[in-house]
Amino acid sequence: MRTLYGLFPLSDQVRQGDMRSLLISLIIYVLAAAITAMLRVVLGWIPLVGALLGVISVLLNLYCVAGGVLAVLRFWQERQK
């Protein structure tokens, strides 16, 4: 589990009982996904850039979902101790 938190440093900063740190990390993940989606819409009409942004958008969305899940798990794990 420690290896996963090395890949998601923002999720590693969530602490026990600190709802603010959890919300901040979740908001940052959602903003990152939203910004890439907006870039994909704005620049998607360019053939090569659109395809590249599509791949990047999917990968970043997966990263954001995994980071959000790890942040929530970290919050719950710390609360149970």
Image (spheres, rainbow, N blue to C red):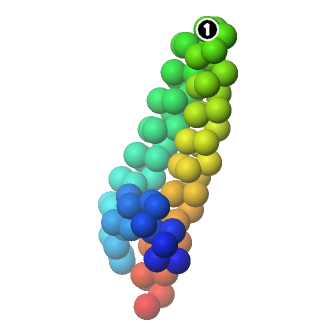
- Residue at x-position 33% and y-position 61%: 21
Is residue 41 at least partly visible in the picture? no
Say which quadrant the C terminus sits in. Answer: bottom left
Instruction: Point out residue 49 in the picture as x, y percentages from the top left corner.
Output: 58, 16
| 56 lies above or below 39 | below
- Residue at x-position 58% and y-position 34%: 56
Q: Report the label total.
A: 1
Residue toward you, 59 or 61: 59
- Residue at x-position 52% and y-position 38%: 33
- Residue at x-position 36% and y-position 77%: 16
Is residue 9 at least partly visible in the picture? yes
Residue under pointer 1: 46
| 7 lies above or below 40 | below
Q: Quadrant of residue 40?
A: top right
Which residue appears farthest toward the bottom when viewing the image? Answer: 81
Which residue appears farthest toward the top when viewing the image? Answer: 46
Residue density around tag 1, few if under 14, some if 14–19, many if 20 or more, within 10 Å? few
| 7 lies above or below 18 | above
Instruction: Point out residue 67 in the picture as x, y percentages from the top left corner.
Output: 51, 57
| 44 lies above or below 64 | above
Instruction: Point out residue 48 in the picture as x, y percentages from the top left corner.
Output: 63, 15
What amino acid is labelled 1 in the image?
Ile
Residue toward you, 14 or 55: 55
